[in-house]
Amino acid sequence: MHNVPKWEKFVRTIQELGKAKIIISGSSSKLLSGELSTILTGRHLDIYVFPLSFKEFLSFKNLEIKDKLAIISKRIEIKSFLREYLKFGGFPEVVLSKAKKQLLLTYFEDILTKDIINKYKIRKGQKLKSLARFYLTNIGKEITFNSIKKFLGISVDSIDLYSSYLEEANLLFFIKRFSSSFKEQEKAPRKIYSIDVGLANAIAFKLSKNFGYGMENIVGIELRKKEFLDPNLEIYYWKDYKQREVDFVIKEGLKIKQLIQVCYSLDDYNTKEREIKSLIKASEELKCNNLLIITWDEEDEVKQENKTIKIVPLWKWLLS
């Protein structure tokens, strides 16, 4: 229907005549935020539907979590399902399908071809696909358009345009580096996240080497959902000149609400020191004492330099 010329005018007419209540779905964010919103101003409510959350995923697996006691008593099953969720993501049909990887690859091709290449009449479709694959192979990493210009052999302007199409089509999203200077914020590298971790795994073929980044991606998706629901909420990452980094900075209004690190394990002394020192430095600079490290299965509370850092397993954080 979306490809039928002036279909949105027909929808408006039906709505104004009071003949029906209409629900319109589409994979592109621009469908509602752009052309449809213009003609249906004041007559529509936008609802963004993400892939299944982990709690919804467990419901699809017939594992009901009613309270905190159930979270503890069923932790072995929960962690087992979390590994599957981390590998294949939360697209409902994929969760129920036996041909999960093939279905994810089909989604990838359909999004690029139908929602971007055909829609915008892109002649260099292969370049767009190469950019999408590059992004999904580098989730959780910092990128600049200049840094991938030579790799793709296309201009920075084209990379900028293609990247906006990929984000509009809800294939991926970017998180900016936090800075009090708008100019510095716009110039700094951005971090890439897939809208679904299974989609990234199907394209990247790097699950075993990328477990920590997959966890980070899942946390990023959950925070992205909260950002959509709360207009006062903004999500960033933080990094200073010494390359100390915090994965997620949650800003609410004018205040920094929480700082979050994601790390598979803190067993290694150097890793633990790096994660904690980065949090403490960011805490001092951003004046935020709500500090959290999300791990695979560790739970603790660390007190250092008059700061308290909570350590929580990913499965528990997702179900809290």
Image (cartoon, grey):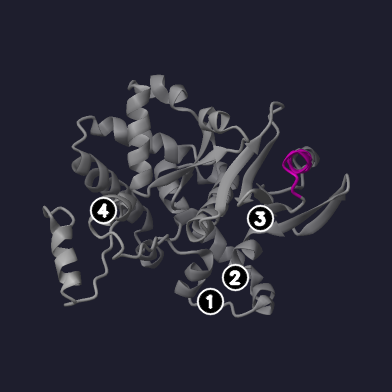
Q: Is residue 1 above or below residue 278?
A: below
Q: Residue at x 80, y 40 (%)?
A: 273
Name the amino acid, label 4: Thr
Work out whether mark 2 precedes mark 1 in sequence or the reverse, and give the earlier one. 1
Which label sits in the foreground, 2 or 4?
4
Residue 78 among those drawn in magenta: no
The residue identified by callout 2 is 77
Residue that label 1 marks:
63
Alpha carbon distance from label 1 to label 4: 43 Å
Q: Nearer the viewer, mark 1 or mark 4?
A: 4
Front-most of 306 and 205?
A: 306
Do labels 2 and 1 touch, CB within 8 Å?
yes
Q: Amino acid at mark 2?
A: Glu
> In the figure, 5 relative to 278: above or below?
below
Q: Which mark is residue 38?
A: 4
* Residue linked to disc 3: 296
- Residue 263's tag is none
Q: Quadrant of residue 131?
A: top left
Task: Identify the residue at horizontal 78%, vertical 37% (top origin).
Answer: 270
Instruction: Find the distance from the CA under tag 2 to the CA under tag 4.
Output: 47 Å
Q: Amino acid at mark 3?
A: Trp
Cα–Cα gap, marks 2 and 1: 9 Å
Residue 130 as seen in the image, left or right of residue 253: left
Quadrant of the image containing the C terminus = bottom right
Q: Are marks 2 and 3 in contact (CB under 8 Å)?
A: no
Callout 2: SS: helix
Mark 1–mark 3 Cα distance, whole angstroms, equals: 20 Å
- Residue 58: x and y, percent? 51, 71
Q: Quadrant of residue 121?
A: top left
Residue situated in front as seen by the camera: 254 or 313:
254
